[in-house]
Image: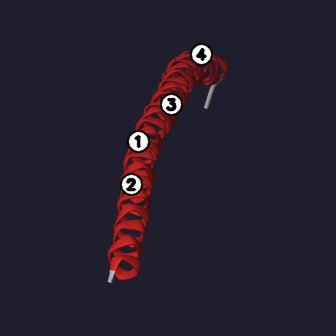
């Protein structure tokens, strides 16, 4: 193999190497963008879940408050009925 052929092969390999380096650079850039996008989507999802859980907790707290109110009302009715029962018992 003569020098001209060697130089031609070397030049061809250099061109191929530059093409591969450019391809690697573009793939790396794409990978970084996809990673960033995934992180953003994860964060949005996490915030959405957090908001959904917060809403669910608020709804459960309202339900608990309503049940507490019902219990108080029933306790008051129970006390009224006990007083009425005591009054009727003492009237006899």
Q: Secondary structure at mark 3?
A: helix
**Foreground: disc 3 or disc 2:** 2
Residue 9: image tag: none
Residue at (41, 79) in percent of width and height: 90
Lower sequence index among marks 4 and 2: 4
Residue marked by disc 4: 11
Lower sequence index among marks 2 and 1: 1
| Badge 2: residue crowd in 10 Å (few <14, some 14–19, many ≥20) | few
- CB of mark 3 within 8 Å of CB of mark 4? no
Residue 44's place in the image compared with 59, above or below, is: above
The percent coordinates of residue 29 (x first, y second) are: 55, 19
Q: Secondary structure at mark 1?
A: helix
Residue marked by disc 1: 62
The percent coordinates of residue 13 (x first, y second) are: 58, 24
Residue 67: image tag: 2
**Foreground: disc 4 or disc 2:** 2
Q: Secondary structure at mark 2?
A: helix
| Badge 4: residue crowd in 10 Å (few <14, some 14–19, many ≥20) | few
Residue in front for this viewpoint, 64 or 6 = 64
Q: Marks 4/2: CA distance? A: 83 Å
């Amino acid at each position: 193999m003569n020098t001209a052929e060697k130089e031609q092969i070397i030049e061809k390999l250099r061109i191929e190497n530059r093409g591969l380096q450019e391809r690697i650079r573009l793939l790396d850039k794409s990978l970084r963008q996809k990673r960033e996008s995934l992180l953003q989507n994860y964060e949005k999802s996490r915030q959405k879940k957090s908001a959904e859980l917060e809403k669910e907790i608020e709804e459960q707290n309202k339900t608990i408050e309503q049940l507490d109110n019902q219990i108080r009302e029933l306790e008051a009715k129970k006390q009224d009925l006990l007083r009425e029962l005591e009054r009727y018992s003492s009237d006899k």
